[in-house]
Amino acid sequence: MEITNAEFVISNTDVKKCPAGIFPEYAFIGRSNVGKSSLINMLTGRKGLAMTSATPGKTMLINHFLINHSWYIVDLPGYGYARRGQKGKTQIQRIIEDYILEREQMTNLFLLIDSRLDPQTIDLEFMEWLGEHGVPFSIVFTKGDKLKGGRLNTNIQQYLKKLKEQWEELPPYFVTSSENRMGRKELLDYIESINKE
Ligand code: GTP
Ligand code: MG
């Protein structure tokens, strides 16, 4: 699938104020700074569409982008950013949880994981929580350009091995880079295949 049109629609803190209608939507979630907004820009081919920053905690709202006039990409705030303080963290967590549990149009959640890191407790616990609530999700490994040679593949295989201890069946996964567009076609084709169901 190719994205021929991408436009920002609205930012919200309240899931009830998200766009009405029945268009399917795909949301991107993960730790602060993992590369959610950059990935959205890479997928849509629009550099400044979602706001990115080297400083964690950039995205604070639920952001809807209308794609090809027929489905949405949703950029969510990152979780686990310590410097927000407890009050800020709780607030962001509430926004994320309400969105995931209440938004019926949300067709698949893409959980972003930094491909350089070992499995982090916060991400594993988040996956547990998704499993408990029956939320359909896939894993997107990010920043694949930062690991050279076979290290990218080795790291991902190790990650999956760890996941197999927790899960009977692995979710679909993708390896991406917003720098060199790795994984772009695979992700868009996957979204297209779900859109057709
Ligand atoms: P929050 O909104 O703060 O939760 O962060 P985010 O997950 O949206 O991350 P964002 O896209 O803003 O990117 C964070 C930083 O990582 C920025 O400095 C990006 O340039 C960098 N970055 C994101 N993706 C990649 C990638 O694939 N490769 C490289 N080399 N850098 C990346
Ligand atoms: Mg962001």
Image (tube, rainbow, N blue to C red):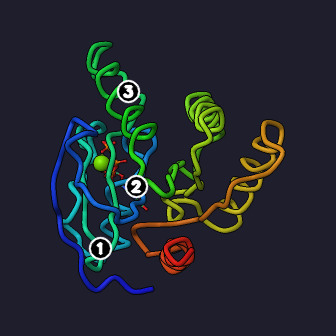
SS state under label 3: helix
Residue 189 marker: none
Residue 135 at x, y = what percent?
A: 57, 44
Return the residue nearer the eye: 35 or 189.
189
User: What amino acid is found at the position of numbered circle 2 in the picture?
Assistant: Gln
Whether tag 3 and tag 2 are in contact, CB under 8 A, the answer is no
Answer with mark 1 or mark 3, whichever residue precedes in sequence: 1
Please give the name of the residue rendered at 36% of the width and 22% of the height, measured from the top-left corner.
82
The residue singled out by tag 2 in the image is: 105
- Residue placed furthest toward the top: 86
Residue identified by numbered label 1: 67
Q: Is 183 rendered above or below residue 76?
A: below
Mark 3 = which residue? 93
Q: Residue at x 40, y 64 (%)?
A: 24
SS at circle 1:
strand
Q: Is residue 174 above or below residue 102?
A: below
Which mark is first along the chain, 2 or 1? 1
- Residue 96's place in the image compared with 1, above or below, is above
Q: How far is the residue under mark 3 from the one under mark 2?
A: 20 Å
Amino acid type of disc 1? Ile
**Image quarter for residue 167?**
top right
- Of residue 67 and residue 50, the one placed in the foreground of this image is 67
Q: Amino acid at mark 3?
A: Gln
